[in-house]
Image: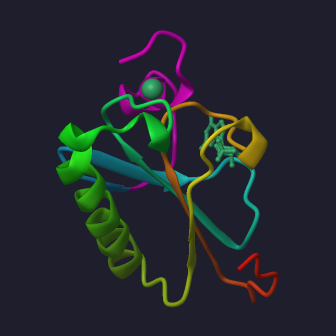
Amino acid sequence: MAENCIFCRIVKEEIPSTKVYESDEFIAFTDINPAAPVHLLVVPKRHIPRLSDATPDDEGLLGRLLLAVGEVVRKNNIDDYRLIINDGPGAGQTVFHLHAHILSGRQLGEKLL
Ligand code: 5GP
Ligand code: ZN
């Protein structure tokens, strides 16, 4: 738990969110400013500021994060989707609590790679 972290406050339900999935370790909820018809955020309950702050101790958590994405898409009947993790301000990260974006529901044509 980090003071004044929006996502820690969402995890603690101090700030409301539209939850679509919850487990011991993760929650998923709809993005407040969606960039696609389906825009979900999958968030570890533990506060890790950004992906590159993760250490080998976080290996299990990072693996389970991707498995949680699979659970979220299955439970919400999401077919094809794009998964994005912004790591740092230069990549567009604005909330410094690790999270993965699930984007779907429109043709995601613009490929960066
Ligand atoms: P980032 O830019 O850090 O990768 O993504 C942060 C995301 O969190 C943005 O897409 C933004 O719209 C979303 N967001 C920021 N504050 C809130 C909030 O209070 N509630 C919800 N549901 N989403 C938020
Ligand atoms: Zn946090």
Q: Quadrant of residue 57?
A: top left
Foreground of the two, 57 or 82: 57
- Which residue is located at x 29 percent, y 72 percent? 71
Residue that extends furthest to the top in the rendered view of this protein:
3
Q: Residue 35 location in percent, x, y? A: 76, 63
Range drawn in magenta: 1-20
Farthest front residue in view: 56
Looking at the picture, does residue 95 appear above or below residue 56? above
The answer to whether residue 84 is above or below residue 17 is below
Ligand 1 quarter of the rendering: top right
On screen, residue 102 versus residue 53, left or right, reads right
What colour scheme governs how the chains and residues are painted in the rendered image of this protein? rainbow
Q: Residue 30: x and y, percent?
A: 56, 55
Q: Nearer the viewer, residue 98 or 102?
A: 98
Could you tell me which quadrant the N terminus lies in?
Answer: top left
Residue 106 horizontal/vertical position (percent): 73, 85
Q: Total of numbered circles in the picture?
A: 0
Q: Position of residue 32 (x, y in %)?
A: 68, 47
83 is within the stretch colored magenta: no
Residue at (46%, 44%) from the top-left corner? 51
The answer to which of 43 and 17 lies nearer the viewer is: 43
**Residue at image coords 47%, 41%:** 52
Residue at 77% in and 41% down: 90
Q: Quadrant of the C terminus?
A: bottom right
Residue 16 is covered by the magenta coloring: yes
Q: Is residue 104 left or right of residue 12?
A: right
Residue closest to the far right: 110
**Prevailing SS of the magenta stretch:** loop
